[in-house]
Amino acid sequence: GNVVRSDGWGFVPLTDAELDFMIKNLRPVIRSDMIHAAYWDDQLVGYVVNIPDVNWALKRTWGRWDWLRMLQMPMLMRRTPKTRVIALGVDANFRNKGVAMMLIQRLIDLWNEYDEWEFSWVAEDNLKSIRAIERAVPVKQYKTYRLYEKTIGKPPTSIQN
């Protein structure tokens, strides 16, 4: 996965421990039919991951205690009308070979299961992916998230007493 994502904005490689932690914590909400990977000669060349909207389900739980609320989550997660595409990536060497469209087609196969899809993790300058998604399904941009960087100050070169 790190090779596929390596040229994305702000990319930081995941360690095996970080990946294991993420899988362990997302396991309760991930559906296996919502994760698709493309391989070429046993090499990962692309993937798409979407998950049901956890926030929708959390808002509908009741009770004071977390253990009671967590008991309700599996049922609510099956009923959520919203989903989020949290990862879509294709190796640079395979981007013009139809891999992205094949992965997007997998999303389209699930399209009618949800009333609302969010593609919030698609960078606005990733025009190829945006256009591919727009050709496949009706989309409406309703929000743009922006991240900015700024150096806060120069660290001291030396400390004198």
Image (spheres, rainbow, N blue to C red):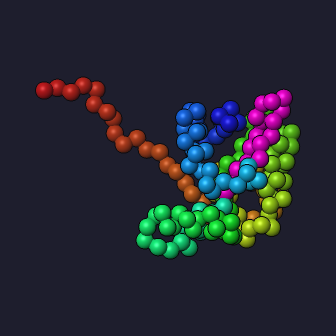
The residue nearer to you, when weighing 43 against 152, is 43
Q: Is residue 155 left or right of residue 118?
A: left
Residue 34 % position (x, y): 74, 54
Q: Quadrant of the N terminus?
A: top right
Corner quadrant of residue 52: bottom right
Report the residue at 82% width, 53% height from top: 106
Q: Is residue 40 left or right of residue 88?
A: right
Residue 65 % position (x, y): 43, 67
Corner quadrant of residue 8: top right
Residue 84 % position (x, y): 66, 59
The total number of labels drawn is: 0
Residue 4 % position (x, y): 70, 36
Q: Quadrant of the C terminus?
A: top left
Q: Is residue 100 above or below residue 138?
A: above
* Main secondary structure along the magenta-highlighted residues: strand
**Can residue 121 be seen in the rendering of this structure?**
no
Asked if the stretch drawn in magenta spans residue 50, the answer is yes
Q: Is residue 78 left or right of residue 108?
A: left
The residue nearer to you, when weighing 128 against 5, is 5
Q: Is residue 156 left or right of residue 151?
A: left
**Can residue 152 be seen in the rendering of this structure?**
yes
Q: Is residue 143 above or below residue 96?
A: below
The residue nearer to you, when weighing 85 against 22, is 22
Report the residue at 70% width, 55% height from top: 31
Report the residue at 80% width, 61% height from top: 110
The range drawn in magenta is: 36-51
Identity of the residue furthest to the left in this view: 161
Q: Is residue 119 above or below residue 80?
A: above
Report the residue at 75% width, 65% height from top: 139
Asked if the stretch drawn in magenta spans residue 147, the answer is no
